[in-house]
Amino acid sequence: MKGKADSMIIDAHNHPDWHGHNLDKFLANMDKYGIDTTWLLSWECPPDEYAAEYNNCIPHPGEGGPIPFARCLSYKERAPERFILGYAPDPRRPEAIDRLAAAVEIYGVQVCGELKVRMTYDNPDALRMYRFCGEKRLPVTVHIDYEFDTRVKYPRPSYWYGGGIEAFERAIQACPETIFLGHAPGFWSHISGDGQHDKVGYPKGKVEPGGKLIDMLRRYPNLYCDISAGSGCNALKRDPGFALDFLLEFQDRMLYARDYFDNVHQEFLNSLDLPSAVLNKIYSGNAVKLLSLQSC
């Protein structure tokens, strides 16, 4: 059967208190769209590394960043069967690995995410944290954004994260035992070889040959894709014919995710007439596989 999944649905990327959704609204939204489980991710970074407008949708920023792990833990404790805990401490902090280790041991954290900081992702401190995640079999979700000319100076000329796809590739090469999930405009724009990755956040038009992302997926079996947010959806919807071939080729490394509360990703995936076995992998099978590795 094509065009419809017949398995559970896992949202592999979302956040507590995000865009006006408290726990009750969050659970109601999951039920509305048939989502069984959500990977609930933190976002830890210094206050001057994220745009002030995020204060409209993150009412409880913590000392460590805009989405503290404590809020993820609060949701998990109140609805334990609906959430998988994620936590990514800022790897530049000297206590980062100890804090992550404690969160795994005490609270059962199963995902390292979301890593969204203004450093190159092959930073030696980050590599040490990735290797710890490899030992614990925690998948690592990273956010990449390039710097653009925004014509402003303060509080930041732009909000770049990760240092580009080359730094991310070096991290993947250096940590072959660690599973990485790529996410955000600076990752998904590399689906095409059109050179728009460092010019616009959401490129349009047909996907052109030579996309760095395609090459990396073929080279590195430890690279997976988080299709969440406008960036993942745009990358697929800009060229549906290419998206069908892409999802078929890399069906074992695609994870359905939202990073928001709409249903655009399901609507698009269901429109592609993919085999149900492939949809089952994207909607939940691949996420389950990654977490099941932790018991091996």
Image (cartoon, rainbow, N blue to C red):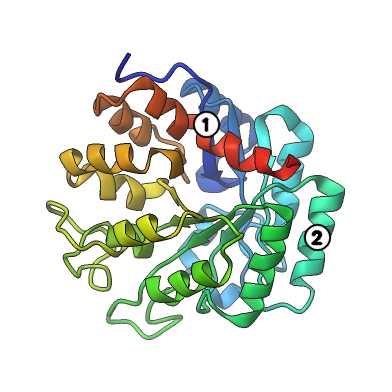
Q: Residue flagged by tag 2: what amino acid is it? A: Ala
Please give left or right for residue 52 compared with residue 62 in the image.
left
Seen at 66% across and 36% down, the residue is 83
Quarter of the image where the N terminus is located: top left
Q: Picture quarter containing residue 3?
A: top left
Residue 274 versus residue 222 in the image, above or below: above
Tag 2 secondary structure: helix
Name the residue that disc number 1 marks: 285
Mark seen at residue 101: 2
Residue 54 versus residue 153 in the image, above or below: above
Please give left or right for residue 257 compared with residue 79 in the image.
left
- Chain-order first, disc 2 or disc 1: 2
Q: Residues within 10 Å of mark 1 (few under 14, many from 20)?
A: many
Please indicate, yes or no, whether residue 269 appears anywhere in the rendered image: yes
Seen at 51% across and 76% down, the residue is 118
What percent of the width, then of the height, locates residue 254?
42, 42
Q: Residue flagged by tag 1: what amino acid is it? A: Gly
Which marked residue is nearer to the observer: mark 2 or mark 1?
1
Please indicate, yes or no, whether residue 255 appears anywhere in the rendered image: no
Q: Residues within 10 Å of mark 2 (few under 14, many from 20)?
A: some
